Image (cartoon, grey):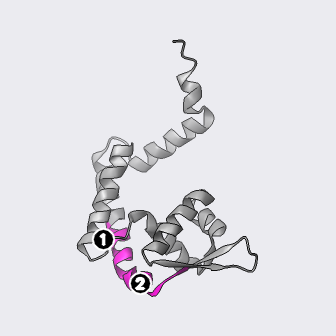
Amino acid sequence: MRHVHELMDGAVADVYAEHGLPDYRPRYSPVVRALVARGPLPIRDLAGAIGVTHSAASQTVVQMRRSGFVTLEKGADARHRIVRLTDRARAALPLIEAEWAATERAVRELDAELPVPLEQLMTATLRALERRDFRARIGDIAP
C-alpha cells in the first residue's frame, strides 16, 4: 500500500514541480481546498474538515507555513491557531484545482483497469481492520 501511495503521490508532486511549485506537496491540497471552501480555520477544525488527526493537520500546516502557503495566527483562545491561505497559495489555486480534477480522472481510469476500484478496496480494508485490528490478526507469536 505504501509503495502504491508513493508512486501516485510522487507523480502528483512531479506535476507541481513541472509547473514551478517544487515545494508544494500533494498532501497540501485538501488543506487548501478546505480553507478555500470554509475560510480561515483553527487547526482542530481543519483536521476535522480533511479527515485527519490534529497532529497530522498540525504537521502539514507547519510544512505549508515554511513553504509560504499558509500563515498561522493566534485565535481568540490562546490555545487555538488560525490557519489562513497566503497570496502565494491563492495564486496557485488554478493549478491546484486543475491538478485535483486531473487526478480524479486518472483515478477513475486506473479503477477501470482494476478488478475492484481502489477506493472500494481501501474502504473495505479499513472496515475490516476496524472490526478486528491487524495486531489481533497477527495473534501471539511464540519465539
Residue beneath disc 2: 88
Residue 17, position as x, y percentages in the image: 27, 70
Quarter of the figure with residue 14: bottom left
Q: Relative to 3, is 90 on the left or the right?
A: right
Q: What residue type is labelled 2?
A: Arg
Residue 83, position as x, y percentages in the image: 58, 76
Check disc 2 and report its element: helix, strand or loop.
helix
Q: What residue type is labelled 1?
A: Pro
Mark 1 surroundings within 10 Å by alpha-carbon count, few (fewer than 14), some (14 through 19), many (20 or more): few
Q: Residue, x 28% and y 59% (percent of image)?
A: 11
Quarter of the figure with residue 99: bottom left
Camera-side residue: 126 or 90?
A: 90
Say which mark, if any, is on residue 22: 1
Camera-side residue: 77 or 7?
A: 77
Q: Relative to 5, is 15 on the left or the right?
A: left
Q: In which quarter of the image is the N terminus?
A: top left
The residue most toward the right is 77
Q: Please state the extent of the stretch shown in magenta in the rendering.
A: 84-102
Give the main secondary structure, helix, strand or loop, of the magenta stretch.
helix
Camera-side residue: 60 or 123?
A: 60
Label 1 with label 2: CB-CB less than 8 Å: no
Residue 88, position as x, y percentages in the image: 41, 84
Q: Residue, x 26% and y 76% (percent of image)?
A: 19
Residue 119 appears in the rendering: yes
Q: Relative to 116, is 50 on the left or the right?
A: right
Task: Give the mark, 1 or 2, whose residue is nearer the N terminus.
Answer: 1
The residue most toward the top is 143
